[in-house]
Amino acid sequence: MNTNRVLFVDDEPNILEAVKRTIKGPFEVVTALGGEAGMAEIDKGQPFAVVVSDLRMPVVDGVLLLRHVRERSPETVRMLLTGNADMEAAIAAVNDGQVFRFMTKPCPGSTMRGALIAALEQHRLVTSERVLLQQTLRGCIRALAEMISLVHPAVSAHTSRVRRLVVEIGTRMQADELWRIEVATMLAHLGWVTLPAETVAKLHVGADLAAHEATAVLKVPEVAAQLIANIPRLEEVQSILMYQNAGYDGVGSPVPSVIGERIPLGARLLRAATDYDMLESRGLSSSEALTVMQSKASQYDPNVLRIMNEIQQGTSISGVVRQIAIHEMQPGMVFAQDVLDTRGLLLVARGQEASQSLLTRLHEYQDPALQTMRVLVATPPGYSAQRRAA
């Protein structure tokens, strides 16, 4: 992304020509004649760091345009320029378009350049925070999940399977801030590490739980939410974790009045994907698992169930399955079966994604049988392209 792209929108051609002549330096200037043309530029999908719009324009005025910019490109910094000292319109623009600066015509070139530099710095701060949250935080959580996989392979495998399904559903639903949902999914089952090993083993195979075990499992969302309670800017992730056991009908919701679409989308995805995986762990096929969920349709977001049916009827969630030797596995492949050592100890659980550290551990594991063992693995859709890109 070119972070210096600036869009100027005005219904007076001479104003736009003057902008092209006077605004030099680190800016890539694009102009649009009128609000409709400005919307068209935004809708092309090539992001702008800053949009400067005139207020008074026919058909689509500056307030409507900047509201459109905020909805389509929330990180773009928005500025308003007008020759009318209209306070009411200015207030509307600030409220609806969340305007960074409000300036009046005529605006000297030096004043405009100073405002643009400030706007570019604001854009840099906003995007840097997003990158920090998306990449740094997600990377840290991946590292934590990888550590968990070395001591609790069943927990890690369950999380991997649920995460892949949640991301696929969320992508098809064009969910906003999908990275937050993915982070919540990666954290959701870390609370399982507080459960006794026997309880985790029962969950892995779908065995019935004793009353005290079921109570402990119900507390997992609270444990997961507590893990990030003191991390700033993760309020949405925490909300997803708190509502992950809530049914679409409100049963199990921590706040009784929060039901249906008032439940965070991430929580609705997580609830459906988790239940689906648990049903498959009990030996049901994907179609049988979905049939059971359809019989309890009030518990799930109908759009989520619809997309899960589309996935099941189309491309396999697991991708192409084949048998290879363990030493031939590459990071990103997914184990399609449990891997046990000669003593019957679970080393890798079905559905766990192979990381470099996990493969290194298997290669160095003191069990000769592993060196010749062949296992079923899945290469998820898009795996080859991802490997080439890496």
Image: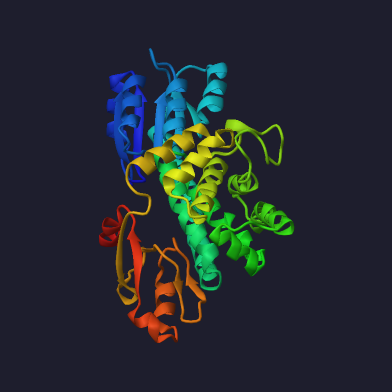
Nearer to the camera, 374 or 186: 374
The single residue placed furthest to the top in the displayed view is 58
> Which residue: 54% across, 39% down?
265
Nearer to the camera, 352 or 52: 352
The picture places residue 42, in percent across and down from the top left corner, at 35, 31
In the displayed structure image, the side of residue 167 where residue 330 appears, left or right: left
Nearer to the camera, 191 or 307: 307
> Which residue: 45% across, 21% down?
64
Whether 243 is drawn above or below 371: the answer is above
Q: Find residue 385 and report its image quarter.
A: bottom left
Q: Is residue 110 visible?
A: no
Quarter of the figure with the C terminus:
bottom left
The picture places residue 151, in percent across and down from the top left corner, at 55, 73
The single residue placed furthest to the right in the displayed view is 212
Q: Is residue 375 visible?
A: yes
The picture places residue 88, in percent across and down from the top left corner, at 57, 17
Whether 237 is drawn above or below 377: the answer is above
> Which residue: 52% across, 55% down?
282
The picture places residue 43, in percent across and down from the top left corner, at 33, 30
Nearer to the camera, 151 or 285: 285
Disc count in the image? 0
> Which residue: 58% across, 48% down?
237
Color scheme of the displayed model: rainbow
